[in-house]
Amino acid sequence: MFKYLKQLTSLVAMVAVLFTFTTETMAAKKSKTLKNTQKKGFVRCGVSQGLPGFSNADAAGNWTGVDVDVCRAVAAAVLGDANKVKFTPLSAKERFTALTSGEIDILSRNTTWTLSRDADIGLTFVGVNFYDGQGFMVRKSSGITSVDQFKNGISACTNIGTTTELNMRDFFNSRGISYEPVAFEKADEVVAAYDAGRCDTYTTDKSGLAAQRTKMKNPDEHIVLPETISKEPLGPVVRQGDSVWEDIVRWSLNTMIEAEEYGITSANADSMKTSDNPQIKRLVGAEGEMGAAFGLDNEWNLRIIKQVGNYGESYKRNIADTGILPDRGPNELWTKGGILYVPPSR
Amino acid sequence: MNFKLKDLGPQLITVLAVVLVFGFFTYNAQVNMENRGIDFGYGFLSQESSFDVQFSLIEYDGSHSYFRAYLVGLLNTILVSVIGIILATILGVIVGIARLSPNYLINKFAAFYVEFFRNIPLLLQIFFWYFAALRALPLPQDAEPMFGISFLTIKGLFVPAFIWQNFNIFFYSIVAAIIAIIVIRIHAKKVQETQGKQTPVLLISIGLLLILPLLSFLIGGVRLEFEVPVLKQLATTSFIYEGGVSLPPELIALALSLSLYTATFIAECVRAGIQGVGKGQKEAAASIGLTPNQVLKLVIMPQALRIIIPPTTNQYLNLTKNSSLAAAIAYPDLVLVFAGTALMQTGKAIEIVSITMFTYLSLSISISILMNWYNKKIAIQEK
């Protein structure tokens, strides 16, 4: 009798262990960040304090920009509504702390992907939504047309807490030019000081220069020099340790880029469901089980395209039509001479 | 001391509560940092910083360590605080006395100044002075020379640099003058206490301070030359001054706004101190034949200072802490350089913020200790 009891107990224990194991993996599939986001009903997104074309709020508090669209895409995928995003404007200095401390769940704030940031501080970069490089802006009246004309004693206005400060030093040092770095905490003050004549040049990412130029008293008085002194791949960042959430953000961005590649737009997305191309059908949720691995339904990618649009639409709406950078340059699809190339959704 | 058991209980509970709360936060931070894969450690301080700083009192560039960058920021904070404290004290004392002036115009003007400047947020004033100055100041090429050797421009104040020969002899001559003045003062006090005779100490002091350094020039072989800043063209419309010493406009704007703001509070301390001395004191002093100057110097001020010093200490502390607003206008103080750029480049938020907090705490406590010592020195000696 006791012999059987002993066997029975061990059997129960084994079943219990097995059961715990299976429920554990099921729970692990559903990411903690995803669960919290769905419970709250909005995506918590960190953006800049105002960079036209990337993340900028209008007078009514509506955010627009290509960085903003990444967060909107995630909201469309996981919550079904691209407007369910709570934007938190952050300075360059605050951004990583806000993400690692859990105040926001996505940082989409023209942030450069570098080794030390990826490896050191508890962050994971999920992709690149804008290929940029650092440049210089000068007054047209200065007669400077190339960085080769920079001389000892030049003063350069910039932001603190960015890769810009480091690139600037590398650049001037390698050319043996002495310079005066004037570094402000917020971009608005950098622009105001440069505009007033405090500095001879203003340096930051070229997209930033183009965007900030529109804020100057007289934009036509300034030019961006042709040289690019660094690689600045800008992209969204998530906290380390939630790989499902990381995948959701990565593939939300990839979906937008791939949709452009296959000519799927917010206008024709629904009609693409009946396309003959299986790759297109997968991108609009008409074939395969593309959402299950994330714990999402099958039309998550269709919602992104319908509500936010593909990458080309987002670029046109935010950056080209606003006159910031009409030419897409490297941010064109690989099929059209650019370097935008994302892994396939399949 | 008289210890009672019933007093011990609440104190033990308080200590326990503090330890628990502190321990909870430390533990919490530790667990969270571990979960997010963030290392904790101060090793980064010896790494190469690889960023430059606009203005530094010690030799520094990006090839130096983060610790050196910390020192640069700290020294810049101390510099602007010291300048601010000196200017605020001078201005505060003048305005404080002016508020008590029987002259209607001076009185009302001082009152207006105090009410205006202390009621506008400091950050706004800093922005105002900085951007107003930037808009108002001329470009380097348009600047009119001041005294033929200095230039105040949008890129800063450019003044001549001193080039000394035998500077140490000049330095010793000043030290000698100061020692002589102290000896004379002690002697003069003794003479006054024993014989009632007054010595013109102030005149002798000024004389000594002028004559001894002058002698060092005439017979000590001290030479002083000026290196006057020279205009240099960078591009068609872009100029800068080379040579000499340049003070960035950020430093000037910050020191100006900090002292204008803090001076209003010091002025009120001074006014309160003087008004706090009983009217009878003044009348009594006058009745024994002291001149108005002597009344102020020997009777009113020693008593007023006791009232003025403690609240003024607070204002010094405020000014030092307020200097951290420098980050808004690019003055490279401790917060901008260390808690700003260095924090961003290393990602060591907890370490750097804790060091910065501890540094401000130490600065404030140092000022407190100094002022308390001075306060004790001038307090009433109970006999």
Image: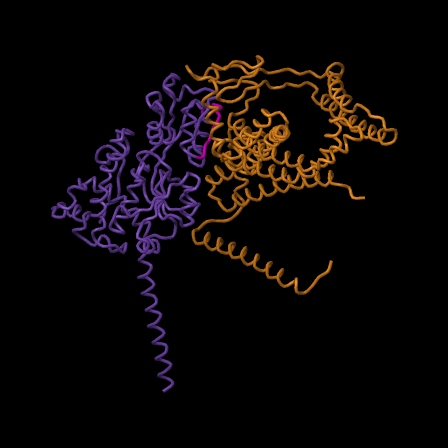
Chain colours: A purple, B orange
Picture quarter with the N terminus of chain B: bottom right
Q: In this view, which residue lies farthest toward the right?
A: B195
Residue A245 spot, x, y in % from top left: 32, 51
Instruction: Look at 34% across and 76% down and name the residue there.
Output: A11
**Residue shown at 58% from the left, 37% from the top:** B320
Front residue (pair B349, A124): B349
Identify the residue at horizontal 24%, vertical 50% (top origin): A80
Nearer to us in this view, A99 or A145: A99
Query: In this picture, which residue range is highlighted in magenta?
Result: A175-185
Can you say whether B234 is above or below A291 in the image? above
Which one is in front, B45 or A222? A222
- Total marks drawn? 0
A278 to the left or right of B180: left
In front of the other: A164 or B292: B292
> Which residue is located at x 53 percent, y 57 percent?
B21
In the picture, which quadrant includes the C terminus of chain B?
A: top right
**Quarter assignment of residue B97:** top right
Give coordinates of residue B191: x percent, y percent.
Answer: 85, 29
**Picture quadrant of residue A235:** top left
- Figure check: B227 above or below B118: above
Q: Quadrant of residue A188?
A: top left
Q: Tell whether position A181 is magenta.
A: yes
**Visible in this render: residue B243?**
yes
Describe residue B210's horizontal placement relative to residue A189 as left or right: right
Residue A169 drawn in magenta: no
Residue B255 locus on image (x, y percent): 55, 29
Furthest-top residue in this view: B148
Q: Position of residue B303 (x, y in %)?
A: 72, 37
Q: Is residue B48 visible?
A: no
